[in-house]
Image (cartoon, grey):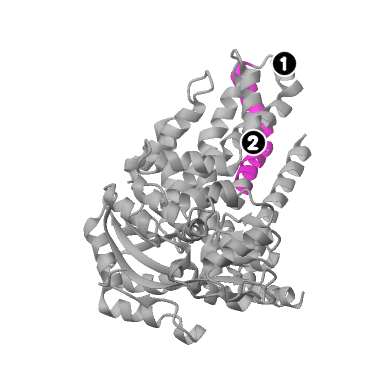
Amino acid sequence: MIHLFEAFKIALGMIVTGDQVVFSIAFRTLLIASASTIAATLLFVPLGCMVHFSNFKGKRIAVGFIQTMYSVPTVFVGMLVFLMVSRSGPFGVMGLLFSPWAIILGEIVLIAPIITGLTISALRNTGKGLEDTATSLGAGRGTMILKVLAEAKYAMLTSVLMGFGRAVSEVGVAIMVGGNISGYTRTLSTAIALGVGKGETAFSIALGLILLSLAMVVSIAVNIMQHGYRGRK
Amino acid sequence: MKRSTATFFFLVAFILAGCSEEPLPVQTDTASDALEEVTGSAAVVPIARVQRLRVATTTSLYDTGLWGYLEPMFEEKYNVELDVLYAGTGKAIDWGRRGDVDVITVHSRTREELFVTEGYGVERVPFAYNYFLIVGPADDPAGISGMTPEEAFKTLMADGEAIFVSRGDDSGTHGKERSIWTSAGFDYDADVRTAGPWYVEGGSGMGPTLVMADEMQGYTLTDIGTYLAYQGDLELVPVIDQGDVLLNVYSVLQVQTSRDPELSLALVDFLVSPEVQQLIGDYGVDAYGMQLFSPCAGQDF
């Protein structure tokens, strides 16, 4: 127990003094997760909107499928992306394996269902009633869509934050397609996985605390967003 | 690189969106905006642009810190970023087969020779050796201290209670363990893996396996380098350190399909150069009071 307490003290020291290795890993993790989230947002928020505002055969099944994919195991995505971007795979020529790009790609795939699905839910929850009211008041379809989008913006932002939260803390994809290369593809979670195995307790705790605070910032932000959203109602 | 990545993002988006019957709500400029965003921020850290060489190494050369020690020297000499990936010998060889790495440093002679004869590796070049140890709890519950490795394994099998933690990950160390079981007269898959709960297949690298054996108060087969590097955190002691079968030779192999054969060859030459051989021999002597690796370039191992 004393040992653990000591390790905690050293870990806090690393954070307070701004240990270079710790913070470069944290910074890289943020960068990779942000890149994935931004790309996934640009691709899948519009997709979610398209799905919600259109009617097509099998829509219910499609939405159900997207929601099932929320909990797709990260190692499964990792394996899939590995086979795709390995030099013997279909996208091998691009040489993406064992680079941050491969991690970004994997995280985009991983959070795509979350962002798409939660965008759909956000629009559905906001749209209930509002769509009928707007239409009955004589609003055209375009106006109605804009109204719903404006009302749902905080809830939609929440979906993006949830995606970021999953991307920043995942380990399966990062270790399989990134390879945990020191100074290049090592993220907070993969560094912790290695550090614990190596008995680098203090270092791992320091990284863990940073990861935890990132997750907390996200969850606080989500909370604030939801309050903002309710406040508008 | 930039363009190909954009195309890739776009393709993936397309594939993912394929399940919807609606047209894609994405235009090419949106995708390239995303890319700008990504590459713009990426400029802060060394992503792409720099020349990179990938070496996949067996975990023992990584966990002992040897690669971490040699890496900056090679990078400085050749002005290249060396990406060191750690994995068991089996996985490292598989990455080599797939063409995902340029060079491998592993320790399993038969598999290395197969790798070369199958046309995946250029040449097997031994560069260092040490010995395997069987380590276990200080009170030696199965009483195997001083036996030959084969006798010890027979005794463990007969005992059926004392825990043995196997790497179980198709690594070079795991391969060595299997060959000891075979020469002790057992069929690995039929006899050993099904022998009972005392035989634990850990499925991780050497360091984590040592930690696991320590936690479970069991025996394990380890290379001496990783054991010394972890010794401070372990209660395990060497139980058996004698036996010809325990010889452990590390080789470096250039992968036939390397994207940069010249630089790959340079890495092989770097490891067997007299200066680096000297450094390998001296590595860890100050910290552990004994040699972790004996250089052996040019010798028949």
What is the C-alpha distance between the residues marked 2 and 1?
A: 37 Å
Neighbours of disc 2 within 10 Å: few (<14), some (14-19), many (20+): some
Mark earlier in primary sequence (2, 1): 2
Specify the label residue B150 is tagged with: none
Work out whether A122 lies above or below B172.
above
In the rendered structure, does residue A142 fall within the stretch colored magenta?
yes
Q: Position of residue A24 (x, y in %)?
A: 51, 65
Specify the label residue A137 is tagged with: 1
Residue range of the region highlighted in magenta in the rendering: A140-165
Q: Are marks 2 and 1 in contact (CB under 8 Å)?
A: no
Q: Is residue B126 visible?
A: yes
On the rendered image, what quadrant is the C terminus of chain B found in?
bottom left
Between residue B262 and residue B187, name the one nearer to us. B187
Q: Position of residue B156 (x, y in %)?
A: 63, 62
Return the residue at label 2: A70
| Residue drawn where x is 47% and y is 41% of the image | A81
Q: Amino acid at mark 2?
A: Tyr
Q: Amino acid at mark 1?
A: Leu
In the rendered structure, does residue A178 fall within the stretch colored magenta?
no
Neighbours of disc 1 within 10 Å: few (<14), some (14-19), many (20+): few
Chain letter belonging to callout 2: A
Between residue A30 and residue A129, name the one nearer to us. A30
